[in-house]
Image: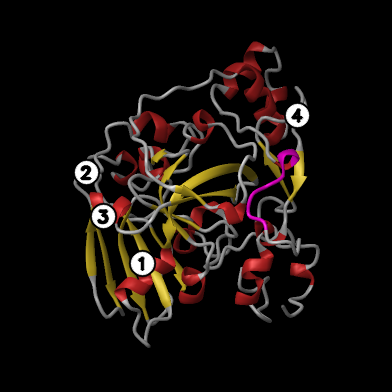
């Protein structure tokens, strides 16, 4: 593979998707931060405490949220190529610390507000620049292609991370089945629009200012990459609603907001599609959104990330963020000599 500038330097050459045990840390939950600070007698001092330190306090004293969602086991094969036996972010943490603004803007809101979200019946349409448009129902999502388990690192643009064992199938398999025409250059995705079930969609204020339905997009080359997964489950069971049931995208070398949830439409296009966060704040959220420790968010550094749950009372363990989230050997060639500061 050609040298792709300093952005790819330091990436491991050995093909390995799972993380080493000492890289994986359990996730923590965030609740009652103000009450914790008040109870400790910190008062106004708490306002000056850095956010990551507040999160550490929160981890130690916050209530551990529970939820009553129902998931069902999936039939799948662990993909031995990517390794097994790694320490993972616990299931109850993965399912109670989510960004899914359709159900509210706090981390706990999706677990609280999505429990009665109906995913069956469901229709996923694949259309646009394809030879054989098709519509998949709920059963098709888990039966059309063999399912496999892959453990990926998830890096949020907010500079926290976790490690999740996803169950799904490659997006490339679906695109090959429908047959992309010679005009297809991009793949657009759209989340369900159902304000009655998704309270965050009822107003832009309630839903974080996003214009719904939520939309995302990839280049065709990114969509066809071997890492790009359509996930229908995690931890061996169907996706909980707060994690994007019944089907979501997982693109592990990009910030988490690219991994769109509860997809109802996939459209192959001849031009770059709009994406929700880029529409809302283009100077903060680019179309590509590749994890890049050398390019900061305008309001915080991306050089390191917090594995939520580690650290002491007044500290929080941070680890260095890896270029392309550690998957550079699989994806750096997609970007050739692109200026990744400009195409962020």
Closer mark to the observer between disc 3 and disc 4: 3
- Asked whether the beta carbons under mark 2 and mark 3 sit within 8 Å of each other, the answer is no
Q: Position of residue 3 (x, y in %)?
A: 77, 78
> What SS does tag 2 mark?
loop
186 w.r.t. 166: above or below? below
| Precedes in sequence: disc 2 or disc 1 | 2
Residues under labels 2 and 3: Cα distance?
11 Å
**Quarter holding the N terminus?**
bottom right
Which residue matches tag 4?
311
Residue drawn at 22 percent across, 50 percent down: 122
> What SS does tag 4 mark?
loop
Which residue matches tag 1?
174
Please, which residue is most extreme toward the bottom here?
Answer: 182
Q: Which mark is residue 52?
A: none
Residue drawn at 25 percent across, 39 percent down: 197
Residue 18 magenta-highlighted: yes
Residues under labels 3 and 1: Cα distance?
11 Å
Which residue matches tag 2?
120
Q: Is residue 312 left or right of residue 184?
A: right
Q: Nearer the viewer, residue 95 or 271?
A: 95
Q: Which residues are magenta?
A: 16-22
Near mark 1 (Cα within 10 A), the count class, few <14, some 14-19 or many ≥20, is some
Which residue matches tag 3?
140
Residue 65 visible in the displayed image? yes
- Asked whether the beta carbons under mark 2 and mark 1 sit within 8 Å of each other, the answer is no
Q: Position of residue 25 (x, y in %)?
A: 67, 35
Closer mark to the observer between disc 2 and disc 3: 3
Q: Nearer the viewer, residue 148 or 247?
A: 148
Q: Position of residue 260 (x, y in %)?
A: 42, 55
Q: Position of residue 189 (x, y in %)?
A: 37, 63
């Amino acid at each position: 593979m050609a040298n792709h500038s300093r952005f790819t330097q330091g990436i491991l050459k050995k093909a390995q998707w799972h993380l080493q045990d000492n890289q994986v840390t359990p996730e923590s939950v965030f609740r009652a931060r103000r009450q914790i600070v008040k109870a400790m007698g910190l008062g106004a001092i708490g306002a000056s405490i850095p956010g990551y330190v507040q999160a550490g306090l929160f981890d130690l004293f916050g209530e551990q949220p529970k939820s009553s969602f129902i998931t069902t086991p999936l039939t799948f094969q662990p993909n031995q190529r990517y390794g097994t036996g790694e320490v993972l972010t616990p299931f109850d943490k993965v399912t109670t610390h989510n960004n899914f603004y359709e159900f509210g803007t706090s981390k706990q809101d999706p677990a609280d507000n999505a429990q009665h979200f109906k995913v069956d019946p469901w229709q996923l349409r694949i259309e646009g620049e394809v030879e054989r448009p098709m519509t998949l129902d709920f059963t098709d999502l888990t039966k059309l292609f063999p399912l496999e388990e892959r453990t990926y690192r998830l890096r949020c643009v907010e500079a926290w991370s976790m490690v999740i064992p996803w169950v799904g199938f490659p997006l490339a398999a679906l695109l090959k089945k429908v047959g992309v025409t010679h005009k297809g250059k991009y793949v657009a995705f759209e989340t369900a629009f159902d304000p009655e079930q998704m309270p965050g969609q009822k107003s832009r204020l309630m839903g974080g200012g996003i214009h719904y339905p939520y939309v995302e997009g990839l280049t065709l080359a990114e969509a066809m990459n071997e890492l790009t997964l359509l996930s229908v489950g995690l931890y061996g069971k169907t996706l909980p609603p707060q994690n994007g049931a019944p089907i979501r995208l997982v693109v592990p070398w990009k910030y988490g907001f690219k991994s769109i949830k509860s997809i109802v439409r996939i459209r192959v296009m001849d031009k770059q599609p709009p994406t929700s966060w880029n529409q809302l704040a283009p100077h903060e959220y680019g179309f590509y959104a590749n994890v890049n420790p050398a390019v900061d968010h305008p309001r915080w550094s991306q050089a390191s990330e917090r594995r939520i749950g580690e650290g002491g009372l007044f500290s929080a363990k941070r680890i260095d963020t890896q270029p392309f989230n550690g998957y550079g050997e699989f994806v750096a060639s997609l970007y050739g000599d692109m200026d990744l500061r400009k195409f962020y």
